[in-house]
Amino acid sequence: MAKGGFRGGFPGGNQANMMRQAQKMQQDFMKMQQELEATKFEFSSGGGAVKATMIGTRQLESIEINPEVVDPEDVEMLQDLILAAVNGAIKLADDKTSEAMGKLQGGMGGFPGLF
């Protein structure tokens, strides 16, 4: 082997490129996370009788209840509508997060299984 070691194809150049890609992915991930945290997810149940709004940090921001559905004789129906609205908002947030992560991972090519 010649003095000076490997020439041309030494993987050190690839390592610098991989570091740049990793830094860009980290920046993209942070940006995506901030966007998701600022997003509001709304879901209505009972044809709009109950609406739950959740922010991207998975905190319930508000619940709106149409006064027409408040029946003291049927509290269980109202409870079911609230549960459906809250669970729907959670699912919307989860679906959006999964979709965003899928897009981010799709651009990672050389880093399978990183996330």
Image (cartoon, rainbow, N blue to C red):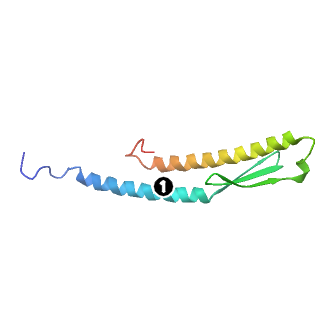
Instruction: Identify residue for label 1.
Output: 29
Q: Name the one closer to the observer, 46 or 64.
A: 64
Is 53 positioned to the left or the right of 109 in the image?
A: right
Density class for disc 1 (Cα within 10 Å; few <14, some 14-19, many ≥20) is some
Q: Name the one closer to the observer, 83 or 97.
A: 83
Which quadrant, please, contains the N terminus? top left
Residue 3 coordinates in the image, percent (x, y): 6, 51
Residue at 86% in and 53% down: 66
Residue at 40% in and 46% down: 109
Is 55 positioned to the left or the right of 109 in the image?
A: right
Residue 52 coordinates in the image, percent (x, y): 74, 51
Residue at 90% in and 40% down: 74
Which quadrant, please, contains the C terminus? top left
Residue 40 coordinates in the image, percent (x, y): 67, 57
Quarter of the figure with residue 75: top right
State the residue lying farthest toward the left.
Answer: 2
So how many labels did they put on this image? 1
Q: Name the one closer to the observer, 68 or 10.
A: 68
Q: Name the one closer to the observer, 8 or 93.
A: 93
Residue 42 coordinates in the image, percent (x, y): 71, 53
Is 52 positioned to the left or the right of 56 in the image?
A: right
Query: Which amino acid lies under the numbered mark 1 shown in the image of this protein?
Result: Phe
Residue at 18% in and 52% down: 8
Quick one: SS at disc 1? helix
